[in-house]
Image (spheres, rainbow, N blue to C red):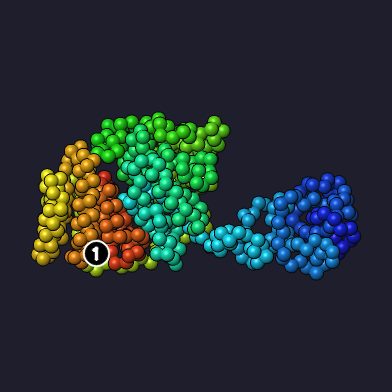
Amino acid sequence: MESCLERSGHPCGTVSAVRHRARRPGLDQQRPGRHPVRAGLFCFQSGPPVQRLQPGCALVQAPAGWVASRARLPARGRCPAGANEHHGKFRGHGLRGPLARAPRRQQRTGPLFSRRCRARLAPQERKESAVNSTLRLAVLADDYTGGADAASMLVRAGARVVQCFGPDVALSAISGLAPDAIVASLKIRSIEPDLACETLRRAFRALSPLRPRQWQLKYCSTFDSTERGNIGPLCSELLTLAGEPFTIAAPALPVNGRTQYRGHLFVHGVLLSESPMRDHPITPMRDSNLVRHLQKQTARRVGLIPLETVRRGVTAVRSHIAELQKQGIEIALADAILDDDLLVLARACRSLRVLTGGSGITAALPAAWTRWTPGALSAPRNAAGRTLLLAGSCSEATLRQIRHWQQSGGLLIPVDAQALLGSPGLEAQRLHAAIAAAFDCGAVPLVASSSPPGARTPMAAESIEKLFAAIAARAAAGLDVRRIAVAGGETSGAVIDAIGLRAAAVASELSPGVPVLASLDPPGFTLVPKSGNFGPPEFFRLALEIMENG
């Protein structure tokens, strides 16, 4: 069959596209500029558009900015000498833009992305286009155990996860692993907003070359932040970095009793402001209305996705989000009291590039991923060496865990708070000697600070962190400690920094929100870090068993 172009004989000039179709009544009268209706053969002619070439052919003016590949046409469909050199077939061979039947994501790699086109890119674009990223999610967590919480939830959902520590992510340590998600754990929960945002920017820049499909700012499910806290500024900063106009805030974590209803946060059915979190030594929470609380922290307008909308399903949530955006809302608190509510939110927000919330929404995200197969990373085996248990939290959950360990016959080495404040160096030496003596007897010691909730000042909390950091570093260097379980968010962060851990594979999950980490950089450590409020009463016994027996 002769091509339309060969029969048109049109003189050289502007580029137009011609399409051959079966004749139907009225087709000959199609106006130039209208997109074709049916698939067929595209060829190209030069010259200004004409109203009509021949019966059965409609002419379409090539829209500005369209791209055609250099794919081969059949012999009769090639452009004659003197015509424009770019040519291509319609279906599956590189024609992109408004002329295609359906929108297609621009292809930056592969045979259709020619060397000639790649050469036109700036050096940084060439570098990024060479990355074949499988990264579905990049989580920016506000503290180390918060990151561990998110990582364990993703592993439970079947995702392959690497957890990194600090804003300068060690990408070299995870090369070849191809994780589905990377959790960058930062220490920004309790610091000033400006410093927190700067740390967030460093982590965002470090992970950007991997081109994650979604970003999540992960904060505690109890929304640990004062009125002048940094959750609002961090949400705003991540939206700015990603160039996005809207995000949700979903702190609920039903599996651990954290739920949100009508914008109010509850802990095991009790309003947050009436729970023990009211007296947290660093981030006391006195207002359970998160819409009001978050609005005090940011200039962006804050709204609500109520539970009634969530229960109506994905379409209702998407419509509500569209309506909120019309009203100028940029951050929407999302109600959720069941895991199924979070699944609805995850599916409804699949097209959002930025999400914020607790590990509950993190756990729901893999269910919304398409063309994905669950799996596990090839994590290193449990480290050989001695085991040390540390408890620096004063939360009620951790105090129960300490009592359970002691009542079940475990060895407890308590921290002398008065001695610590008076002479921290001498107290650290005493504890190190006690740990060494326990190892000589074949025992696994638990070193614990047992101050009751509300009795610890910020200054004492800082002293506890430094003490446990010194204990862990000295025990790793001098006592061959390679397996460590730590209770307490700030304490876990201090210990991880003290042993120089930068990246770890998430090997398994001990309990909801509590992962087992196999270190990658440096190798040779097994860690079980957890937030003070997480874990069952027998946490230390379970941690000991899983670290020693796998």
Please, is residue 215 above or below residue 454 in the view?
Answer: below
Task: Find residue 346 and report its horizontal and vertical position in percent.
Answer: 46, 46
Task: Find residue 531 and report its horizontal and vertical position in percent.
Answer: 28, 48
Residue bearing mark 1: 482
Question: What's the residue at 65%, 61% (across, down)?
Answer: 120
Q: Is residue 144 visible?
A: yes
Q: Is residue 254 visible?
A: no
Task: Find residue 278 and report its horizontal and vertical position in percent.
Answer: 27, 34
Question: Which quarter of the figure has residue 458?
Answer: top left
Using residue 259 as the reference point, say whether residue 354 is left or right of it.
Answer: right
Task: Find residue 259 and report its horizontal and vertical position in percent.
Answer: 35, 38
Numbered circles on residues, count? 1
Question: Which quarter of the figure has residue 521?
Answer: bottom left
Please, is residue 429 above or below residue 338 in the view?
Answer: below
Question: What's the residue at 89%, 54% (across, down)?
Answer: 54
Type of amino acid under label 1: Arg
Question: What's the residue at 43%, 56% (across, down)?
Answer: 181
Q: Residues within 10 Å of mark 1 (few under 14, many from 20)?
A: many
Q: Quadrant of the N terminus?
A: bottom right
Label 1 sits on a secondary structure element that is: strand
Question: What's the residue at 85%, 55% (across, down)?
Answer: 13
Looking at the picture, tell me which residue is in the foreground, 349 or 446: 446
Q: Quadrant of the C terminus?
A: bottom left
Using residue 309 as the reference point, say whether residue 539 is left or right of it.
Answer: left
